[in-house]
Amino acid sequence: GGCLGVSLTSTQLNLHHLFRYHQIFLSGCLAGVFTTVIVAPGERIKCLLQVQSSGGRSKYAGPLDCAVRLYKEQGIRSVYKGTVLTLIRDVPSNGLYFLTYEYLKDVLTPEGQSVSQLSTPRILLAGGVAGILNWVIALPPDVLKSNFQTAADGKYRGLADVLRALLREEGPKALYKGFNAVFLRAFPANAACFLGFEVALKGLNLLAPSW
């Protein structure tokens, strides 16, 4: 009877973890949807300004000028060009990002200790690895998005057209263009991000423990 009780408890615990991870993944995906609404126009403007800078021509005086001219020339649709690709990039990668972080925190927590007691080096490790995996998923659609957002109007009919053109002209490696630079940035940036999050969370719990 005792063994059965332990077995049931273990099964319930595993189901609880699976349900929690499922919730975390879906929450991250939903966060990606809401983020895209704000991020997509900024991404479009950033890409156009970067291309203009590298090309030596200055079509736009700055971010505000770029936004105003895009809106005047083709309306709000032009400002949000590439939103579907931004969603394809941010929704699954955000879900994996938060899921990986929470899973690694659980794995790195010594037996008998609470996740909230996780040491700083382990938080940094979990956050850094989560950041790298996030970009492993996000980089191919990010490359496609950047190509689509900076292309001349009418050059591409949609996602499949951008993908075909990129593979034809540069091959599969083009989907991970810039990965080395992203890799070098992803680990420290996301490790610091999650450490700051955990420190802020502990501080808020101390200031307002009943909330």
Image: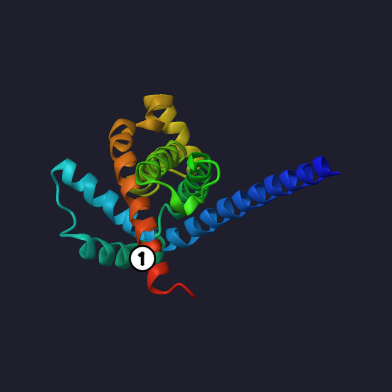
Quarter holding residue 146 = top left
Left or right for 117, reference 79: right
Three-letter amino acid code of the residue under disc 1: Gly
Whether residue 155 is visible here, answered yes or no, is: no
Report the label total. Answer: 1
Residue most extreme to the right: 1
- Give above or below for 117 relative to 74: above
Which residue, given by chain and number where applicable, does mark 1 sit on?
Answer: 203
The quarter of the rendered structure image containing the N terminus is top right
Residue 66 seen anywhere in this rendered image of the structure:
yes
Q: Decide: few, some or many residues near mark 1? Use Cα within 10 Å; few <14, some 14-19, many ≥20.
A: few
Task: From the viewer's side, name the closer residue of 32 and 143.
Answer: 32
**Closer to the camera in the image, 205 or 153:** 205
Measuring 69% from the left and 48% from the top, which residue is drawn there?
Answer: 13
- Helix, strand or loop at label 1? It is helix
- Height in image: 3 above or below 166? below
Judge whether 69 appears above or below 121 on screen. Answer: below
Q: Residue furthest front?
A: 2
Whole-percent x and y of residue 180? Answer: 30, 31
Residue at image location 23% in from the left, 45% down from the top: 51
Estimate the x, y position of residue 91 in percent, counting from the top left.
51, 51
Towards the viewer: 22 or 118: 118
Residue 118's x, y, as percent?
43, 48
Q: Residue 107 location in percent, x, y?
A: 52, 39
Residue drawn at x 44%, y 62% is: 37
Q: Residue at x 73, y 49 (%)?
A: 12
**Is residue 64 positioned above or below 91 on the image?**
below
Locate residue 34 relative to residue 73 in the image: left or right.
right
Judging from the image, the colouring scheme is rainbow
